[in-house]
Image: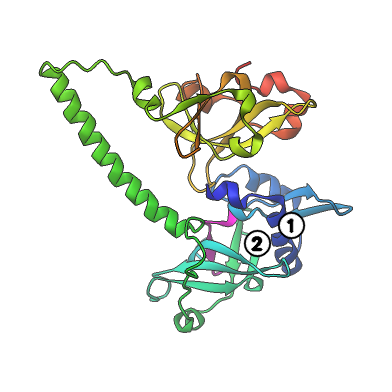
Amino acid sequence: MLRTILATTALATVLSTNVMAETKPLPKETQVQSEMRDDNVYLFDFDTLSEGPSQGYLASNLIGKYIYTSSADDADTVGDINDIVIGENGETQAVIVGVGGFLGIGEKDVAIDFNRLSMSANEDDEIRVTSDVTKEELDGASQYERPNHVPGWANSGSVRDEMDKVAGATKDTYNTVRNEAADSMNGAADTITMEERWMDGKTPVQNAAVTTDNLIGASVYNAGYEEIGEVSEALVKTDGQIDAAVLDIGGFLGMGEKPVAVGFEDLKIYQNDDGDLFVATPFTKEELENAATYDAATYKQQRENMLLGS
């Protein structure tokens, strides 16, 4: 859920305040080309409650990105951004960077002042994060330790650890299913369908009873009951009712995901005993992957062309 937590306009505003003060605006052609790449940093325009347009970078887009020593193609990498620290005054103070193997430095997490970062374009006009930090500074820096009272689920390093656990659990599940299949071949009647297995422990919920707050972040499954993403946004009609849900399909930690708008009435909502919501779609993996990529402006003008289903 890291992307859901960090991808907010407020954080984009904070990030733009510091970075844009240190760098000149990038050429428009650089912005357009960079937006076509999923492995890049994106600069975008947005409006806030203040007058006038702003520019900035989403925190969710920076998480997981590498910091380079320069914009040159052969530049060394300092490490990858694991977290971002916001000060009490609302300004970005530092980034938590996992450094390792950089000029002989052992792996550790280090807090680097945000004003030591710059956004620049390399020879291919790709925007990347760079820093003038030196080996001596990193070598002598204290290792960052997350405070005990701060949960670790919002840290990309912790997410990677959890993914390792998931991988182990997946292997156990595979062995269990394989053994059950073998028992069935030996004469044990197994009439439980994939849908019934998925439904175990879940209760159907009326769509009308679901709020936007509860819907956002819910896990999404395709027609084969495979988890394929999560709900990132709820699109509401003028009467306050949910018209459609934006599903982030695929990707990891907010990178490489594809947003797809699906009619709300085409979704089936379920809830487990802990109150967690699960969203089942009638669409296959291929249908979701081939659907139109959601864009807010286009959706307002051409809803039917962009909406999958209904």
Quadrant in the picture for residue 178: top left
Res. 267 visible in picture:
yes
In the image, residue 249 above or below residue 124: above
Q: Amino acid at mark 2?
A: Ser
- Residue at 54 percent of width and 73 percent of height: 111
Q: Is residue 62 magenta?
A: yes
Seen from the viewer's position, the closer of residues 13 and 244 is 244
Tell me the tag on residue 120: 2
Count of numbered marks? 2
Q: Quadrant of residue 17?
A: bottom right
Please tell me which residue is depicted at 14% across the width and 23% down the height of the picture: 183
Tell me where residue 302 appears, x and y as whole percent: 74, 22
Residue farthest to the front, as pictured: 273
In this rendering, position of residue 117 left or right of residue 224: right
**Which is more foreground, mark 1 or mark 2?**
1
Q: Position of residue 272 (x, y in %)?
A: 45, 34
Label 1 to label 2: alpha-carbon separation: 19 Å
Q: Hey, what amino acid is under mark 1?
A: Thr
Farthest residue in the right direction? 51
- The magenta segment is 61-69
Q: Which residue is mark 1?
A: 13
